[in-house]
């Protein structure tokens, strides 16, 4: 089958229009077959749990590359809409919180990893963290409460598609079972990362101020729906920031290390 031009691009794959009302997530050749199969298993489990996620189809091979079919959802990422319609920011921040709460009310589903084990691995793999700081983070993690609830692991406005009154959450490959407040901290760490560029980039400064406003509204709405966890959320923050450092996002680790050192150094 001849592919049409891609409709979206990601780090691991490109998204193409596909047959029978589906899209095809076509992975780059360096993505292993095991990784594709793992994503398919997570996507099927999440969809079966009744969450607002696209229905996954089959794994196929196209032009020597593995692909995973998904139900086509003709929406646009929340983050992209917000960039051109900033007056919608408060509404979207509240909607993001409401979607996150719905995820966190879902018990952990079969065949997904432990949030605690993944965080421990990421902290140990963070090359820009000194050994004493790694140990401090692992010790702090050991003191935090366990959980057995579904956590997305990469929940932010670009992973929520909107179409009229419908929403779909995508990219569940980092899903775990664990503590929802750690997942909230992860979302805020992701959204506030723009702060690392704000000192030298005027556009990033404007984005930072907008994201601070967005984040405050998101947190206010989340804790209005799930009250009582604010202090624990703050204790998760440096632990999750340390784990984020293992991903080695260009230009971000210096800012993340500052956050960790301020709380646990």
Image: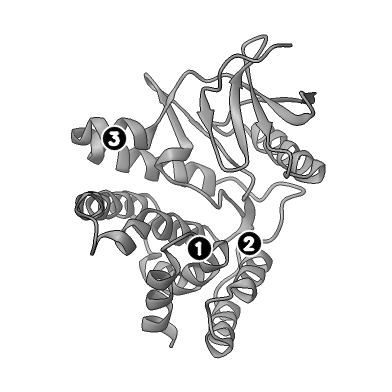
**Depicted 122 relative to depicted 138: above or below:** above
Foreground pick, 209 / 221 = 209
The span from disc 2 to disc 3 (Cα, nearest Å) is 30 Å
> Who comes first in sequence, dot 2 or dot 3?
3
Mark 3 and mark 1 in contact (Cβ < 8 Å)?
Answer: no
> Who comes first in sequence, dot 2 or dot 1?
2
Q: Which residue is mark 2?
A: 115
Residue at 76% x, 31% y is: 66
Of the 4 image quadrants, the one containing the N terminus is top right
**Depicted 229 relative to depicted 194: above or below:** below
Mark 1 and mark 2 in contact (Cβ < 8 Å)?
Answer: yes
Q: Secondary structure at mark 2?
A: helix
How busy is the neighbourhood of tag 2: few (under 14 within 10 Å), some, or many (20 plus)?
A: many
- Looking at the image, the residue that sits furthest to the bottom is 132
The span from disc 1 to disc 3 (Cα, nearest Å) is 25 Å
- Give the image location of residue 79, x and y in percent: 36, 37
Of the 4 image quadrants, the one containing the C terminus is bottom left
What's the colour scheme? one colour
Q: Which mark is residue 182?
A: 1
Foreground pick, 108 / 16 = 16
**Depicted 119 relative to depicted 62: above or below:** below
Q: Secondary structure at mark 3?
A: helix
Q: Quadrant of residue 237?
A: bottom left
- Give the image location of residue 117, x and y in percent: 68, 67
Left or right of 45 on screen, residue 245: left
Residue at 53% x, 44% y is: 103
> Who comes first in sequence, dot 1 or dot 3?
3
Q: Which residue is mark 3?
A: 82
The span from disc 2 to disc 1 (Cα, nearest Å) is 9 Å
- Give the image location of residue 242, x and y in percent: 51, 72
Q: Secondary structure at mark 1?
A: helix
């Amino acid at each position: 089958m001849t592919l049409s031009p891609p409709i979206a691009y990601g780090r691991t794959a490109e998204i193409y229009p596909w047959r029978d009302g589906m899209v095809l997530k076509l992975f780059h050749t360096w993505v292993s077959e095991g990784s594709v199969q793992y994503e398919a298993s997570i996507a099927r489990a999440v969809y079966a749990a009744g969450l607002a996620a696209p229905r996954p189809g089959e794994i196929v091979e196209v032009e020597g590359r593995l692909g995973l079919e998904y139900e086509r959802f003709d929406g646009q990422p929340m983050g992209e809409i917000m960039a051109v319609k900033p007056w919608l920011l408060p509404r979207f921040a509240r909607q993001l919180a409401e979607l996150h709460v719905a995820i966190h009310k879902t018990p952990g589903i079969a065949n997904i990893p432990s949030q605690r084990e993944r965080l421990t691995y990421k902290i140990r793999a963070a090359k820009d963290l000194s050994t004493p700081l790694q140990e401090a983070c692992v010790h702090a993690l050991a003191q935090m409460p366990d959980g057995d609830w579904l956590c997305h692991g990469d929940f932010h406005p670009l992973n929520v598609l909107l179409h009229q009154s419908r929403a779909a959450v995508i990219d569940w490959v980092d899903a775990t079972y664990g503590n929802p407040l750690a997942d909230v901290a992860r979302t805020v760490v992701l959204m506030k990362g723009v702060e690392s560029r704000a000192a030298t980039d005027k556009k990033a400064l404007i984005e930072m101020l907008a994201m601070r406003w967005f984040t405050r509204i998101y947190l206010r709405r989340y804790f209005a729906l799930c009250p009582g966890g604010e202090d624990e959320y703050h204790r998760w923050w440096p632990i999750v920031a340390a784990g984020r450092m293992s991903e080695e996002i260009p230009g971000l680790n210096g800012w993340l290390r500052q956050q960790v050192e301020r709380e646990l150094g």
